């Protein structure tokens, strides 16, 4: 069985610039480019049992939306079957989903909430 050795992308070493006048060596600094974190959208799914008022309250409480915006999101969930409540980094989105699901379970509602990667 033949296996391939994995390629490891290491950063290039800094370029050495020598100054002949006094024998000092200076390393040239290279800027590193970092990618922004991948973003995830928190999506609530429609069901026929969770009261609309509860959904609006959850959106206001956990996503810091005003009453009008929360109502618009709730109506989108109700009419389209799903609605985006916010876009966050992966860890924050997972925390928001956990908070919503915990509140729904404590209130006895079958509300479902998921996070999914944002498509670029």
Image (cartoon, rainbow, N blue to C red):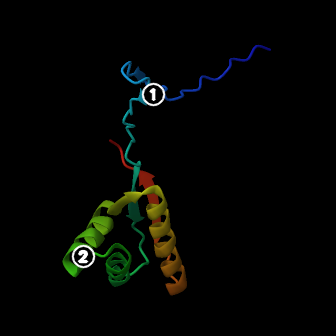
Q: Residue furthest front?
A: 22
Q: Secondary structure at mark 1?
A: loop
Tag 2 residue? 71
Locate residue 78: give its quadrant: bottom left
Which sits in the foreground, 116 or 17? 17
* In front: label 2 or label 1: 1
Tag 1 residue? 14
Say which label, 2 or 1, has the lower sequence index: 1
Tell me if mark 1 has few (under 14), some (14-19) or many (20+) residues whose alpha carbon lies within 10 angstroms of its own: few
Pinpoint residue 67: horizontal percent, then vertical percent: 23, 81
Residue shown at the point (40%, 61%) measured from the top left:
42
Compared across the picture, whether 12 is left or right of 78 comes to: right
Locate residue 89: give its quadrant: bottom left
Pinpoint residue 38: horizontal percent, then vertical percent: 41, 48
Pinpoint residue 99: horizontal percent, then vertical percent: 48, 74
In the picture, which quadrant includes the N terminus?
top right
Q: Secondary structure at mark 2?
A: helix
Tell me if mark 2 has few (under 14), some (14-19) or many (20+) residues whose alpha carbon lies within 10 angstroms of its own: some
Q: Residue furthest left?
A: 68
């Amino acid at each position: 069985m033949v296996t391939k050795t994995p390629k490891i992308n290491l950063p290039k070493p800094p370029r050495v610039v020598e100054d002949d006048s006094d024998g000092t060596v200076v390393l040239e600094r290279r800027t590193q480019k970092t990618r922004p974190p991948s973003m995830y959208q928190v999506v609530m799914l429609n069901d026929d049992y969770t009261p609309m008022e509860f959904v609006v309250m959850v959106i206001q409480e956990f996503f810091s939306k005003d009453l009008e915006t929360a109502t618009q999101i709730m109506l989108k969930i109700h009419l389209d079957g799903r609605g985006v409540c916010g876009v966050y980094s992966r860890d924050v989105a997972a925390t928001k989903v956990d908070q919503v699901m915990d509140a729904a379970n404590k209130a006895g509602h079958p509300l479902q909430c998921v996070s999914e990667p944002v498509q670029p």
